[in-house]
Image (cartoon, helix red, strand yellow):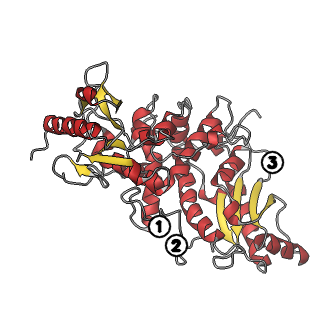
Amino acid sequence: MSLEQAVEAPQKTAAEAAEVAEDWRPKILAFTCNWCTYAGADLAGLNRMNYPADVRLLRLPCSGRVNPQFVLHAFQKGCDGVLVCGCHPGDCHYSTGNYFTRRRMLLYRRYLEYLGIEPERFQIRWISGSEAGKFRDTVVDACEAVAKLGPNTKYREEGR
Amino acid sequence: MSNTLASVQETLRQRARTLLEDGTITYLIGWEAGRFEGQTTPLILRKAADVDRLIYNEFCVHILAKYPLSDKNIEGTIGVVVRGCDSRGINLALKDGQIKRDKLYLIGIPCEGMKDARTGQELKKCLQCTHRNPVVYDELIGDAVEDGAKVDRFAEVAQLESLSVDERYDYWAAIFSRCIRCKACRDTCPSCTCRECFTDQAAMGWQGKETSLAENQNYGITRMFHIGERCIECGECERVCPVRLPLMQLNRKIIKDAYELFGEFYAGIDDCTPHPLDHYLLDDVEEFM
């Protein structure tokens, strides 16, 4: 498809074409930093906060550990949304990790959007160890947004 | 002094002869005529007697920046003919510590754009070129030419950005479905200098072997982000692609965003400025609060 053809092509939505089962719930992968967001999620649990079980936490030493390839892989292996969470800038356990993450993810998020992934499906948030409420709100909002979009059909590896 | 290609070629041959004879360089990397009319191919010139094989004309499309890196045991000094794009590639290799400056003798040639032998038209990558004069060299043949792109190099990106996400996905899926994963784009790219590419790390399993759209997307998207803002915009990936994928539309998107977020930046115009993703500022753009 040439650029001209793409510009003139009729609007069609890949997600619309797919049939959505009634009991479908989004599958969201959250990369959480060990020192802040994971502790924040733990605090949310301690405080008996309710948030959707659609999110799967993956604990990493630092948000700087999130190789951009992990995000693409998550979509390829069937996730409907990806969250990358880390300490607030200035609070990184390793001093500078999240500053690099910030620059990298600013570019990568725009890049994936350019490649056709809805921006709602890939979000980055800074959540500290004491921000249990923010963790819950982030997860609730992300799950709602992704549920509204429906299952992700883009970049999926099929037949596996 | 005029900048005609014939006079540049003549001076280049004379200089090559002198440099090889007096032992300044062990060999010179330049171009020679290919088998077909208008075709050229990179040349490693070792003997002063062969100097007439060296050519410089409007079809010297290959970028030479990556050739010196293949020599792992450099004896003496390597001579390289550099134009704007080659010199930026060399600078990138210097910055990355791939090669030492004193191992290189650079003969600079200001370049006014190369032509496609098939069509006789100026190459797209040359129309979009921002740095026509070499940015690093030991001697310069010919007078400096005017820098600056002849066309808006972000025009295609802007056009794609105006589409909806679904349209963009379909556009890129159609493109990646044609990829044959020959990795020519990686092999020719002066910015791709990892000792071991992620696609070759079979045990890690970053890159699968299946012939499928998902694996093509994984390869194309990841490779381009690995280069990211380090791209010197030589456009070689696009030129060498056997299935003619518009790969620079991916690179240019990253470069365009990097400009907007972190300020204007040209990779490889010197060998010391940090790249946008090499460093950070405390007051960078904040979108993730």
Q: Report in which chain the residue with disc 1 lies.
A: B
Residue A27 on image: x %, y %: 77, 53
Residue name at image x 69 percent, y 52 percent? A70
* Residue B271 placement: quadrant: bottom left
The local secondary structure at tag 1 comes to helix
- Residue A22, labelled with which disc? 3
Q: Secondary structure at mark 2?
A: loop
Q: Residues within 10 Å of mark 1 (few under 14, many from 20)?
A: some
Check whether the beta carbons of the residues at disc 2 and disc 1 lie within 8 A of each other. Answer: yes
Q: Is residue B229 rendered to the left or right of residue B137? A: right
Q: Nearer the viewer, residue B198 or B15?
A: B15
**Residue type marked 1:** Leu
Q: Residue at left 14%, top 43%?
A: B3
Spot occupied by residue A42 in the image (x, y as percentages of width and height): 86, 72
Residue at point 46%, 67% (across, down): B262
Label 3 marks which chain's residue?
A
Is any atom of residue A139 visible in this view?
A: yes
Residue B58 location in percent, x, y?
23, 34
Residue B264's x, y, as percent?
38, 64
- Disc 3 packing (10 Å; few <14; some 14–19; many ≥20): few
The answer to whether residue B17 is left or right of residue A156 is left
Report the Cα–Cα distance between label 3 and label 1. Answer: 42 Å
Tag nearer the camera, 3 or 2: 2
- Which numbered disc covers residue B285? 2
Identify which amino acid the numbered label 3 is placed on.
Glu
Looking at the rendered structure, whether the residues under marks 2 and 1 are on a common chain is answered as yes
* Residue wearing tag 1: B261
Label whose residue precedes the other's in the sequence (2 or 1): 1
Q: Which residue is at the front of the view, A40 or B15?
A: B15
Residue placed furthest toward the top: B35
Q: Is residue B239 above or below residue A133?
A: above
